[in-house]
Image: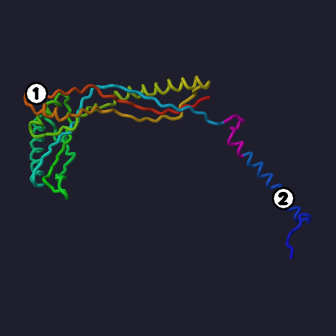
């Protein structure tokens, strides 16, 4: 049985016309929605035009705080003996720091480790001894004491000075100057780009900031450790300057 309906029948002609009218109306409504999104009430273009740039501000400051990593490394045939030797040496180092006037809250243990030493020439490798490490981080708030801290702790049993980093305790003043410089740097770049593109900056849409101070680390080689251990020599430590930087990302509105 053939179920195909003919469009020549009156009811189907009416349904077809209604469907066509609905589709046409829908098409006009869609065009109107798009027009509303693209234009404001007065018919002008409402698209936001932007220009985005990065700016950097840098300021050098004299550090007033030093962070020093000081450690002891001890070896022994037995694990317990190595651990006890490292503990005794570190106890002497900590006492020397306290005697220098370093506050106990500025001394923090950062590493304690115990590991086996192997003879790799044998198959299988054999344990021939043990190695114990004990490391503390020391915050020195008087820069003039840094050299004395190194010398005194080495004399007291420390055999590792892993590094010295200098920083500014309160960097807010320097950061304020760097922040202004960063914004000025960003605006100068934006003005140059706007002029080259033939547009005008009319406002700021957003600003974000990142950055901080860059500590200046100093590392002591084995030869310098031997030099520091010589009681007749005083370890020279020069703090120099540290750099504080601020980075800004600014999005401008242009016309």
What is the image's colouring? rainbow
Q: Which residue lies at the image location 46% right of the left edge and 27% below the top edge? A: 183
**Among numbered discs 2 and 1, the one appearing first in the sequence:** 2
Residue, disc 2? 18
What kind of element bears circle 2? helix
Structural distance between the alpha carbons of marks 2 and 1: 103 Å
The image quadrant that residue 80 belongs to is bottom left
Is there a contact, CB below 8 Å, between mark 2 and mark 1?
A: no
Image coordinates of residue 137 in percent, x first then y, are 21, 41
Q: Which residue lies at the image location 22% right of the left edge and 26% below the top edge? A: 238
Q: Which residues are magenta?
A: 33-45
Q: Quadrant of the C terminus?
A: top right
Tell me the crowding category of disc 1: few under 14, some 14 to 19, or many 20 or more residues within 10 angstroms, Cα based.
few
Queried whether the magenta region covers residue 224, the answer comes back as: no
Residue, disc 1? 233
Instruction: Name the residue at the bottom extreme.
Output: 1
Q: Quadrant of the N terminus?
A: bottom right
Task: Count numbered badges in the picture.
Answer: 2
Image coordinates of residue 81 in percent, x first then y, are 9, 53
């Amino acid at each position: 049985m053939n179920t195909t309906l003919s469009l020549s029948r009156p009811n189907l002609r009416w349904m077809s016309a209604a469907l066509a009218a609905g589709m046409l109306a829908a098409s006009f409504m869609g065009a109107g929605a798009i027009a509303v999104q693209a234009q404001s009430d007065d018919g002008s273009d409402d698209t936001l035009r932007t220009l985005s740039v990065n700016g950097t501000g840098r300021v050098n400051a004299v550090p007033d705080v030093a962070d020093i990593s000081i450690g002891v490394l001890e070896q022994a045939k037995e694990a317990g003996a190595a651990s006890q030797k490292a503990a005794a040496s570190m106890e002497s180092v900590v006492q020397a720091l306290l005697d220098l006037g370093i506050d106990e809250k500025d001394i923090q243990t950062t590493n304690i480790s115990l590991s086996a030493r192997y003879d790799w020439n044998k198959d299988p490798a054999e344990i021939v001894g043990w190695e114990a490490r004990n490391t503390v981080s020391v915050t020195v708030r008087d820069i003039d004491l840094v050299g004395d801290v190194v010398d005194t702790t080495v004399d007291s049993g420390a055999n590792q000075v892993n590094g010295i980093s200098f920083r500014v305790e309160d960097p807010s003043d320097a950061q304020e100057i760097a922040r202004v410089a960063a914004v000025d740097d960003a605006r100068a770049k934006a003005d140059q780009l706007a002029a080259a593109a033939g547009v005008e900056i009319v406002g700021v849409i957003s600003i974000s900031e990142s950055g901080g101070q860059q500590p200046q680390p100093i590392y002591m080689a084995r030869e310098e450790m031997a030099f520091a251990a010589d009681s007749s020599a005083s370890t020279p430590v020069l703090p120099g300057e540290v750099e504080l930087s601020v980075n800004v990302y600014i999005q401008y509105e242009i016309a």
